[in-house]
């Protein structure tokens, strides 16, 4: 049973550049959520995708965008990178939109460093 | 006020003791509550979920929920050095967003 997979594991970018992170959900899951986790902090909700649409969004600027594909995989795009975007980016999958009885399962994350 | 609040710690307990981790939340309409464990450099791992008032036990772990007080806790009995990690409280709010606290760092000393 494949879990949540994310790529790449590490990434170094320069300020102002753009980055794309990828995620494949756990088998049987159809909802993907993205979180940003700064060092020493809890994960911060970026957005959630279900049926190829953004359904929920946290307090992140429009520089953060995403996409979900028909096979439920997802991408997170960040434009005009800032130093403050350096963090661990976590993808989590679940079954159904509300996730009331379907807790999130996390991937191993992508460590993004902006220099 | 943060939507989900935890003491950041670190919380230090001796091996074999009970570790008590606490969490409060602000959205009174929240229905689902979760505890995740995160080892340094790793991703969060679900250890407990609780949906109704009272206690829920799973092995050495007990989650407690009091919706009237908007309070969730996690007890770890017979703490082991391998339990040393950051524990994240997560609350599914009325809007369907899963919101995390900042985490409590637990250190279990041999």
Image (tube, rainbow, N blue to C red):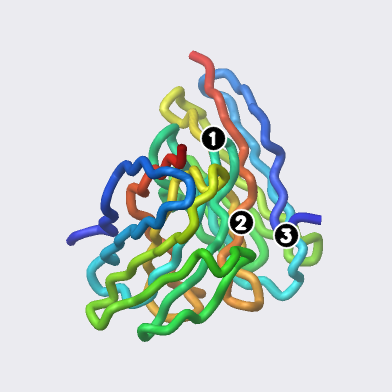
Q: Chain ID for label 2?
A: B
Quadrant of the image occupied by residue B20: top right
**Mark positioned earlier in the residue sequence (1 or 3):** 3
Q: Identify the mark at residue B27; answer none if there is no mark.
A: none
Residue drawn at (56%, 65%) of the image: B98
Quadrant of the image occupied by residue B14: top right
Q: Chain ID for label 1?
A: B
Residue drawn at (33%, 47%) of the image: A108
Q: Is residue A27 left or right of residue A33?
A: left
State the separation of the CA atoms marked 1 and 2. Answer: 14 Å
Look at the image and tell me whether residue B62 can be seen: no
Give above or below for B16 relative to A19: above
What is the tally of numbered marks visible in this picture? 3
Instruction: Give the percent coordinates (x, y) of residue B72.
Output: 67, 54
Asked whether the residues under the numbered discs 3 and 2 touch, taking CB atoms below 8 Å apart as contact, a structural biologist would say: no
Quadrant of the image occupied by residue B31: bottom right
For the residues beneath circles 1 and 3, the answer to whether they share a chain is yes
Residue carrying label 1: B77
Residue carrying label 2: B55
Q: Give the label, 3 or 2, closer to the camera.
A: 3
Look at the image and tell me whether residue B106 can be seen: yes
Density class for disc 3 (Cα within 10 Å; few <14, some 14-19, many ≥20) is: few
């Amino acid at each position: 049973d494949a879990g949540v997979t994310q790529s790449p594991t590490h990434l170094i970018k320069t300020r102002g550049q753009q980055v794309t992170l990828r995620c494949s959900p756990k088998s049987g899951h159809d909802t993907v959520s993205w979180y940003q986790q700064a060092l020493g902090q809890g994960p911060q909700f970026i957005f959630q995708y279900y049926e190829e649409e953004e359904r929920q969004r946290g307090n992140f600027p429009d520089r953060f965008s995403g996409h979900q594909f028909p096979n439920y995989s997802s991408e997170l795009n960040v434009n005009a990178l800032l130093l403050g975007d350096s963090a661990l980016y976590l993808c989590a999958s679940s079954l159904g939109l509300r996730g009331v009885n379907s807790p999130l399962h996390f991937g191993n994350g992508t460590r993004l460093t902006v220099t | 006020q943060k939507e989900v609040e935890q003491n950041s710690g670190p919380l230090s307990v001796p091996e074999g003791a009970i570790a008590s981790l606490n969490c409060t939340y602000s959205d009174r309409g929240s229905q689902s509550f979760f505890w995740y464990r995160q080892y340094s450099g790793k991703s969060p791992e679900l250890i407990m979920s609780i949906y109704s008032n009272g206690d829920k036990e799973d092995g050495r772990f007990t989650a407690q929920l009091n919706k009237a007080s908007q309070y969730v806790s996690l007890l770890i009995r017979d703490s082991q050095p391998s339990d040393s990690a950051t524990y994240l409280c997560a609350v599914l709010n009325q809007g369907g967003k899963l919101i995390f606290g900042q985490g409590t760092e637990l250190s279990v000393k041999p």
